Image: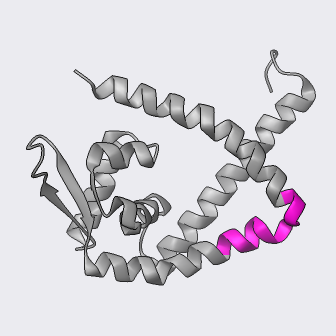
Amino acid sequence: MTDGLRDDDAELVATLLAVSDVLALELDRRLRAEHGIARFEFAALAALGDDAYSAITMGDLAMLLNASASRLSHAMDRLVDRGLVTRIPSADDRRSVLATLTPAGAELLREAAPTFDGLVGELVLARLDVDGRRALLDALRGLATGLCRSHRDDAAASVSP
């Protein structure tokens, strides 16, 4: 793969990327076919459907989803056009816009969640026993803690004045 990685490390990285890519592609394919939304749009609806984030700034939602402001803006345009999400000015900061889930968005989320959960169960969870799931979760948490924090820090720095 590269000159800098040992063979087993190169295999680890290649396998991690392959699994991530296949899972993302299959989730995207199934969600589009059955519910007319992309995987990323589903993730945005799911975040907005979480009581902790029911009205969230676009910037915070982008960081939560590990997405660029541009990617989120395009997805939100599609969701707003379909009546699934609203964007409203923040009462606390007039420079900020809050995203909220509409009743139609909540309904689509309820309909699509079993598709998402079922496919994740089929492609990932069914292939791992309880110990395998625990080990994978521990390993991914270790990666996510550093990577996601670094990504969020970089994203915040790129939009800060």
Splitting the image into 4 quarters, where does residue 159 fall? top left
Residue 45 visible here: no
Q: Is residue 126 left or right of residue 25?
A: right
- Camera-nearest residue between 149 and 16: 149
Dominant SS in magenta: helix
Q: Is residue 18 visible?
A: yes
Q: Position of residue 87 (x, y in %)?
A: 18, 59
Image coords of residue 99 (percent x, y): 24, 58
Q: How many marks?
A: 0
Q: Which residues are magenta?
A: 119-132
- Residue 153 falls inside the magenta stretch: no
Q: In the shown orientation, is residue 112 left or right of residue 73? A: right
Q: Residue at x 62, y 74 (%)?
A: 117
Q: Nearer the viewer, residue 150 or 12?
A: 150
Residue 111 drawn above or below residue 1? below
Q: Residue 129, position in %: x, y?
A: 88, 66
Q: Residue at left 30%, top 42%?
A: 59
Residue lying at the far top in this picture: please name it. Answer: 4
**In this rendering, is residue 76 above or below 126?**
above
Q: Position of residue 114 (x, y in %)?
A: 57, 81
Quadrant containing the C terminus is top left
Residue 5 left/right relative to 19:
right
Answer with the quarter of the image where residue 132 lies.
bottom right
Residue at left offset 54%, top offset 64%: 28
Residue sitting at x 36%, y 29%: 156
Q: How is the image coloured?
A: one colour
